[in-house]
Image: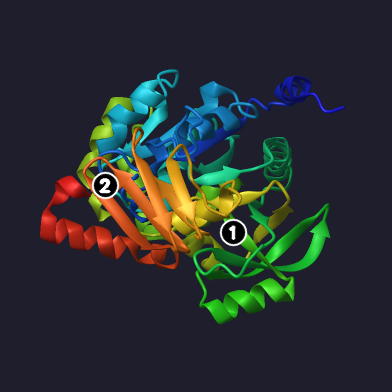
Amino acid sequence: MYNKRIFYENLLKTMNIHDFCVILAGGEGTRLWPMSRHDKPKQFVDFFGMGRSLLQQTFDRMSHVIDKDRIYILTQFSYLDLTYEQLPEVPKEHILPEPLHRNTAPAVAWAALHIFSKDPEANVVAVPTDSLILDESRFLEDVSEGLNFVAKERELLTLSVKPTRPETGYGYIQLSDEIKDNLYRMKTFVEKPELDFAKFFMESGEFYWNTGIFLFQVTDFLRVAGELFPDWSQRLKLFTSDRHDYQKEIEVMRSGYDSMPNLKLENCIFEKYGRVFVKPCTFGWADMGGWADLYEASPKDAQENVVPESNALCYESKGNVIQVTEGKIVVVENLNDYVIVDKDDLLVICPKKNSLEWRKYVNDVLINLGEKYT
């Protein structure tokens, strides 16, 4: 019989002193507006009434497989107070604040350089905060196996899951022939395909969703980054040349980070580097990128509505996400596949299929009504 406590105790025994984690918590989360807003984006929000935000849940999860003293948080300067408040157990020196958002490639490269200064033998797993993990035990086993792989084989590795629907908002990884122990070389990577291609990818059985969970031995990652992007890699090294002085490193980064390119890690590594390995996983995953993603990942009521911590009466209505302020009641009739969100001074009612357009809504509100509503 499965015993969760014993599982975690055994997992702790396998911890490698060279294993590190980087939690990516710098996103703006506009596609989950208005629950996610500029002063408190999605990683700091508790969407499921669990008493822990997405950031806190990610930290709790990763601390089962990696010592808390080797977990780092990448965020933005504007979110520092929220990070301190939600993770008081994390030393301030383990929080790396970007002066401005420059996407995941320079952020992970900075974290890799910082960790390299602490341990050149480090094995690193970089995880986003907006991943919903359904089977935590299986996930932690996959991460542990992945860290062992990158330490032994000195290859870059990503975790992937089998598609369950033709989703146009995810990245797709095509697998080549199996190498060993359910590990494959990456053949191709396609970011956010059109619907027809997404259907083809799913039906082919050769493509898996990219989870955004990336593992590497720190020396190997820095070598690859230096080969692919020597200019910005060299600039980053100059910014962090005195990495034993945390405060000085932060000040230097603030003065020069705006010269870094706005690049996603996948576009840098997956599309330009030929030797990336893939581990297909079955831990149950969803990207909490937007309301349609939240709907797919959440428990449904008898009418297939998602109503987290809300008082709602639904008549002949299905496929909706309804989230309203505590103490309010919402009555819905003859409405299908909509998102209804009431948060403080905002009420948003939009078709669920339009969730990829929510950045446009936020921009329009910003231009016409002001920053206070975004």
Packing grade of label 2 (10 A; few <14, some 14-19, many >=20) is some
Q: Residue at x 39, y 50 (%)?
A: 331
Q: Where in the figure is residue 246, as x and y percent of width and height? A: 33, 27
Check if mark 2's residue and mark 1's residue have beta carbons within 8 Å. Answer: no
Distance, label 2 to label 1, CA atoms, is 25 Å
Q: Is residue 100 left or right of residue 87?
A: left
- Of the numbered discs 2 and 1, the one sitting upstream in the chain is 2
**Residue 63, quarter of the rendered image:** top right
Amino acid residing under circle 1? Asn
Q: Residue at x 60, y 70 (%)?
A: 166
Instruction: Name the quarter where the N terminus is drawn.
Output: top right
Amino acid residing under circle 2? Leu
**Is residue 28 shown to the viewer in this render?**
no
**Residue 312, quarter of the rendered image:** top left
Packing grade of label 1 (10 A; few <14, some 14-19, many >=20) is many
Q: Where in the figure is residue 175, as x and y percent of width and height? A: 71, 67
Q: Describe the element under mark 1 as helix, strand or loop.
A: strand
**Residue 41, quarter of the rendered image:** top left
- Residue wearing tag 1: 210
Extreme residue in the right direction: 1
Q: Which of the numbered marks, if any, corresponds to residue 100?
A: 2
